[in-house]
Amino acid sequence: MKAGLGQLRRARRRFFGVGRGVSELFEALAEIRFSPRFRGVRWLSAVALLLLAVQLVTGVLLSLYQYPAPGAAYDSTRHLTGELATGWLIRSVHHWAGELLVAAVAVHVLATFVRRAYRRPREIVWVVGVLLFPAVLAARFTGPLLRWDTIAFDAARAGLDVLANVPVIGSLAAQWLRGGQDLGANTLSRFFATHVLILPWLLSALLALHLWLVRRHGLSEDEA
Amino acid sequence: MIVLIRHDADPRAVEDFLDAVRARGLKVVPLEDRRGRAFDVVGPGTDALFEMRDSPAVAGILARRLPPGPGEPLWPHGVLRLAIGALLLLAILVLLSAFFPPGLGDRADLEAPPPPRSSVEWYLRPVAALLDLAPAPFPGILVLALWLAFLLWPFLDRAPAGSARARLVVRVVGAFAAALAALLATGALG
């Protein structure tokens, strides 16, 4: 039996061609414990992480067909939705993952607050997490206008008006996103650049920092 | 190398000790479920820890690993759970996408009149409703102040762990904020 297992192990190593690397990876994974504190609403953090991954993958696929110019943006969305196989599905999954991501992050932040999981030494974990929330909202806000239809156009215009009424951060962001006196080609370029280039990197950086800090400090004790 | 912390150690002394350990290029991993009372120290040159055992924070140093704490191993149990959860979530996403696909309106018209406030998407409605409460700029300042207070809350709440008063405050604030946001987002409060 032992000889059989040894042969199997050697065959696996030959198959992967990486010596002991794969075996060591599984051994190392078995050493890590899945914390018993990771239960209940804490699962929302994993849900949010997966939704963000879905957003990145579907977003890259959508960007292959989306044009950031007022005339072409609408046509490319129609082409993507009506003519490309599974194009409607990718767009739809991207939309729903975005909606659920906002809800998951909001509930995760609220649950962390109610559990007082922000206490020393996790203050910076909280600050980074709370900064992630407006970044997720910004990603959700800048996405729909890229299809350049009346629904998204009205929502963007009304949203920018709301943003402009929040002093300093809001008004500056609204001014920058609008790219002029009113919505137009510049606005679409700004929304596209923010949604496709700036926010994915910003979100990834903040998320990496958040996860690193969580790993460093461990999960907090439950106060709820 | 496992470092055991004295049960009556001053938290600042513990932090100073851990900072000194990290300054030697060693990695400090808190052992979960030992309530900050034991740390796994890994990296080259852990023997240097024995020179630091006179620290007022240290109860003892063990040269071998403690038995694993409670909880399932990440492989295969945890990975299996995560995989099942991920598949469920993906199934929900595909079902929502198939039955409720997002619409596509007419081509945007740059000359169209400004839209009503109700065109704001659901996640911005609580802020939009707060902004409508009073003439500018006061509601905007209020929104910014609320957000900053929320961001810096850990530095405002310095009550010790398990404080019944602090727990009551966060529960009341959390429930109020959640209810208000839900009512405003759904338009129940106009």
Image (cartoon, coloured by chain):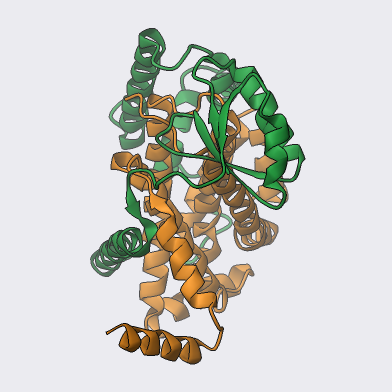
Query: Who's the residue at 39% across and 42% down the image?
Result: B122
Q: Toward which corner of the image does residue A110 lie, by quadrant?
A: top left
Q: Is residue A163 above or below residue B139?
A: below
Q: Position of residue A89 (x, y in %)?
A: 35, 74
Q: Is residue B102 above or below residue A16?
A: above
The quadrant the N terminus of chain B occupies is top right
Q: Position of residue A68 (x, y in %)?
A: 63, 69
Q: Colour of chain B?
A: green
Horizontal relation, residue A206 to residue B51: left or right: left
Query: Who's the residue at 49% across and 50% down the image?
Result: A154
In the depicted view, which residue is nearer to us: B70 or A93? B70
Q: Position of residue A73 (x, y in %)?
A: 56, 71
Q: Is residue B176 above or below residue B91?
A: above
Horizontal relation, residue A189 to residue A51: left or right: right
Figure chain in orange: A
In the depicted view, which residue is nearer to us: B50 or B115? B50
